[in-house]
Amino acid sequence: RKEVEQDPGPFNVPEGATVAFNCTYSNSASQSFFWYRQDCRKEPKLLMSVYSSGNEDGRFTAQLNRASQYISLLIRDSKLSDSATYLCVVPNQAGTALIFGKGTTLSVSS
Amino acid sequence: EADIYQTPRYLVIGTGKKITLECSQTMGHDKMYWYQQDPGMELHLIHYSYGVNSTEKGDLSSESTVSRIRTEHFPLTLESARPSHTSQYLCASETAGGTDTQYFGPGTRLTVL
């Protein structure tokens, strides 16, 4: 299994839709997980951190399944401004750095 | 917004030139990182530092070098730029306390002709 693996998409959804991304990871000892958002030609920015079973922030919900080693990001009531690439991030085996997934691209249309 | 800065934002330069990409942060973070990202591709860690006088190579082999003489400053140098170095270079720093949250600078988009 790759250290971090994501479905690259793209996910093309209409405004108001609910969309979910999955990410699998290989480091079973990881205690922290992150979702970053990266707009086209911009730097990544932290969207959510996940330290236990999940986290919710407005329309965004992150869930962690340790047994199956995957984390998910759910976006409800999608907005045009949600269009971006969403990066799944997990610490590496040595705990010395973060591993960024290739990202899942979301395109929300009106 | 995080206080991490990179200069220049864009650089177009000829083959064989020596270049230094600047990165500085005013948050007092001990950990700093350099990533390389090609368009539409994932970030690759090329260097990191856990504090002054500490530098390590990342997962992706790179011909660049880094230095960390001051906490707030983490420059990256290419002694002789080549077209294969064309990419976006992103600097990041990490909060203290083991939260692993990284804040990124705006990046330097390098083009070597």
Image (cartoon, helix red, strand yellow):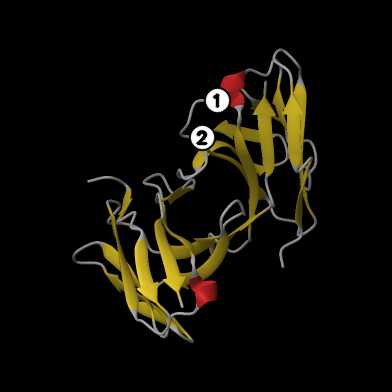
Residue B57 to residue B73: above or below = above
Q: Are marks 2 and 1 in contact (CB under 8 Å)?
A: yes
On the image, the x and y values in percent for residue B45 come to 52, 39
Residue B56 to residue A93: above or below = above
Q: Is residue A40 among the parts visible in the rendering?
A: yes
On the image, the x and y values in percent for residue B8 come to 79, 40
Horizontal arrangement in the rendering, residue A69 relative to residue B87 (left or right): left
- Check residue A94 in the rendering and tell me which mark sits there, or answer none: none
- Check residue B62 in the rendering and tell me which mark sits there, or answer none: 1
Mark 2: give few (<14), some (14-19) or many (20+) Cα within 10 Å.
some
On the image, the x and y values in percent for residue B74 come to 73, 39
- The quadrant in which residue B76 appears is top right
- Pick the front one: B97 or B38: B38
Q: Chain of mark 1?
A: B
Residue A41 to residue A67: above or below = above
| Residue at the spot 41% in from the left edge and 54% down from the top edge | A103
Q: Chain of mark 2?
A: B
Question: Dot 1: what SS?
Answer: loop
Q: Which residue is mark 2?
A: B58
Amino acid type indicated by mark 2:
Gly
- The quadrant in which residue B75 appears is top right
- Pick the front one: A16 or B35: A16
